Image: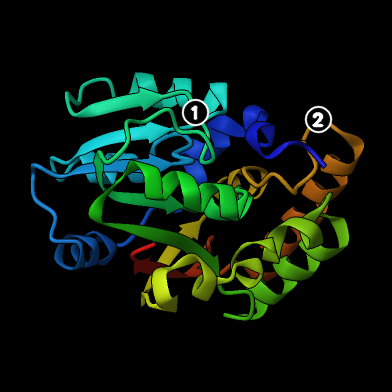
Amino acid sequence: MTAPTQRFSNRVDNYVKYRPGYSEQVLVFLSEQAHLSNQSTIADIGSGTGIFTKLLLDKDYKVYAVEPNDAMRQYAEEDLKKYNTFHSVNGTAEKTTLAGNSMDLVVCAQAFHWFDQQKTKSEFKRILKPNGLVALIWNNRQIEADAFAIAYELLLQNQGSDYKEVNHRNITDINFNNFFSGGKYELAKYSHLQVFDEDGLVGRAFSSSYVPPKDTEAGQAFLAQLKLLFEQYQANGTVNFEYQTEVYLGKI
């Protein structure tokens, strides 16, 4: 299996264009529950191309975006350089290089399942201020939302390169009670939707690290089946990806 820090190096363009964003409700929830202000300092760990980082910067927070993948981090640096509260950091969740006792909030959007949980917990404790919080966030694709969703899930299971190993490695393998102090955390859930034409569906699929690269024989076979699915299930030229965004927030 490809190292987590390198899995998306050859998928940056599709990742930027086709990965889902996050509901405004997520930002409202974090602001209210973590008592954030424009003086708040936030670490976005595993920040990737900066999808969630940008949402935080738009709220005028000071954000340290920690990302070990060179291609993804460099994209974010170019894309977000206009924000004077943006700080790019070449580091990992287990070794962020950030100053101790410096962060009001740590966020991990679609990334925590790649980390060593115990080492990460120790590092987050080190960089957080005494009353600081951690938010673990995922966009979970609803695999039984409709007939297309069911068929797409089956395609991933049958032709994804390591889909079964990667997919539910995320939330199902995380002991939230152990990670959060006293097993206490808040869980908020929000609905989110992406609508794709055929090109968008192809881009979204190949942004996933468990889909074979398009320039391989396996990738071409996957692409052919994907186009057949689109033709079968599209309505007015589009298909939907439905998500449930889950936010786990608490002290550690």
Q: Position of residue 236 (x, y in %)?
A: 51, 66
Along the line of sight, the residue nearer the viewer: 110 or 199: 110
Secondary structure at badge 1 equals: loop
Q: Within 10 Å of the Cα at label 1, are there few (<14), some (14-19), or many (20+) other Cα atoms?
A: some
**Sequence order check, earlier mark of 1 and 2:** 1
Q: In this view, does 71 lie to the left or right of 58?
A: right
Q: Where is residue 85 in the image (x, y as percent from the top left)?
A: 18, 29
Question: Which residue ends up furthest to the right in the rendered image?
Answer: 217
Q: What kind of residue is marked 1?
A: Gly
According to the image, label 2 marks what residue?
A: 215
Residue name at image x 46 percent, y 20 percent:
74
Q: Which of marks 1 and 2 is in front?
A: 1
Task: Using the image as rendered, state which of residue 203 and residue 9 is in the foreground.
Answer: 9
Q: Residue furthest left?
A: 38
Q: In which quarter of the image is the C terminus?
A: bottom left
Residue 14 left/right relative to 61? right
- Residue 29 appears in which quarter of the rendering? bottom left
Residue 202: image location, x then y, percent? 64, 47
The reply to whether residue 201 is visible in this rendering is no
Q: Quadrant of residue 167?
A: bottom right
Q: Nearer the viewer, residue 61 or 106?
A: 106
Residue 91: which disc?
1
Residue shown at the point (43%, 33%) measured from the top left: 66
Answer above or below: position of 173 versus 51.
below
> Which quadrant of the structure image shows residue 158?
bottom right
Residue at 82% over, 42% down: 1
Residue 235 spot, x, y in % from top left: 55, 70
* Three-letter amino acid code of the residue under disc 2: Asp
Task: Classify mark 2: helix, strand or loop.
Answer: loop
Residue 192, above or below 198: below
Q: Nearer the viewer, residue 205 or 21?
A: 21
- In this rendering, position of residue 227 left or right of residue 217: left
